[in-house]
Amino acid sequence: MALLIATYEYRDTGLRRLTAPAQDAEALAAVLKDPYIAGFEITQLINEPHHRVGEAIGDLYRNRRRDDLTLLYFTGHGLKDEDGQLYLAMADTRRDNLLFTALPAEQVDRAMHGCMSQQKVLILDCCYSGAFPSGHIAKAGTAVHALENFKGRGRSVLTASDATQYSFEGNQLIGEAAQSVFTRHLVAGLQDGSADLDGDGDIALDELYSYVHDRVVDQTPHQRPKKLDNVEGRIVIARNINWALPLHLRHALDSPIAEERRAAVEGLAHLHRIGNELVRPRVIQEIQHLVADDSRTVSAAATALLASLPEQALETLPSAPVSEPTPAQSEPRPPRPNLARAEEAPERDRQDPPQEQEKSADNSTGAQQNRPDPRPIQTVDDSQPKVIGLLYLALIIMGLTGFIVLATYLGN
């Protein structure tokens, strides 16, 4: 369940003079409610009065279970009175009557405290200011201490900034409210999956904050996002629908060097341990490819890894890829050169020449019919005595012929 609050239109003439916060709440709502990315049930309140917003916040935190994930997002202006109390400005907020026309941070804190959920996420993309009567000096300085206003068990609080950027003294505006890029990077990191920093297919809140923090600071160095955590374990906000095998693993799998491919088996094993339900089937497919690798060491390692996986992991393997492959993935792998491997050379030399593969069953019958039987045919040869007799007769005739020729010669 997520409640998104955005206020950028104010009845107060002074607040209307401020730079309007980025209207990215609609884009964030679209990403969070996408069933393939986050699947939140979304409620949006745009430019609503404070009583309507307070009622919705109460509904968000009411009757929640311990394992429910709740997300409250606010983009707009935060106002700090002369006593240092923080208020969230709504469409009907008046600077001279914050207590009854704005939403006190204390009220939000009490609602969160009464909620059973141990996964409460609060995101504040606020431009903070001081609002106090002319001639008064703020007692708490320029720091807002937004995190301290919302600390408690089971909470993760992200804030785009934690210092006042401008102030009101009566009707005089001092300073300037800079445009925040915090929400813009939140949306980008979730939408394209780039906030999945560890490549496990899940986008945890810690990863999302790190991703946004680095980009906000790079773009606007004066803006320093902050985070406060008091939760058990990690909070997964979304899935990376554009997940692809990490480049270092892809390069290792395509390497012509057997040792690099064998090392990739260990990387796949780690990825299978930490990956989500979208990542694990893809990893198993890569392991199965390595089982047929031409290196015995690589094939043996992949076979052992595949055998160590639980049976249910193999049963859930889809017959087709989980998502459409990227152009880089869809290209056929380049053939590896036939490199000699030292560890396999001796055994390869001892191997007999490969035999021809058996023909298919359809062709084997006809081939067997036409192929001569190598076994000798056992028959009874009754012509053997006749042949011997003919040989004797031929010898006798030759002997007589020779005798006649010799006698004739001597008579002459």
Image: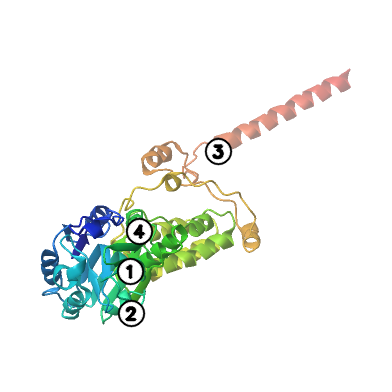
Which residue in the protein does label 4 denote?
180
> Quarter-wise, where is residue 161 in the image?
bottom left
Which residue in the protein does label 1 denote?
159
Mark 1: amino acid: Thr
| Nearer to us in this view, 116 or 216 | 216
Residue 115 drawn at (x, y percent) = 16, 78
Mark 2: amino acid: Ala
How far apart marks 3 and 4 lie (CA) works out to 116 Å
User: Which residue: 36% across, 40% down?
Assistant: 362
Which residue in the protein does label 2 denote?
140
Which residue in the protein does label 3 denote?
385
The answer to whether the residues at label 3 and label 2 have Cβ atoms under 8 Å apart is: no
Question: Upstream in the sequence, badge 1 or badge 4?
Answer: 1
Instruction: Characterize the local packing of mark 3: few (<14), some (14-19) or many (20 or more) Cα atoms within 10 angstroms.
Output: few
Which of pointers 3 and 2 indicates the residue nearer the eye?
2
Instruction: Characterize the local packing of mark 2: few (<14), some (14-19) or many (20 or more) Cα atoms within 10 angstroms.
Output: some
Left or right side of 281 for 11? left
Residue 279 drawn at (x, y percent) = 35, 60
How far apart marks 1 and 2 lie (CA) works out to 19 Å
Visible in this render: residue 231? Answer: no
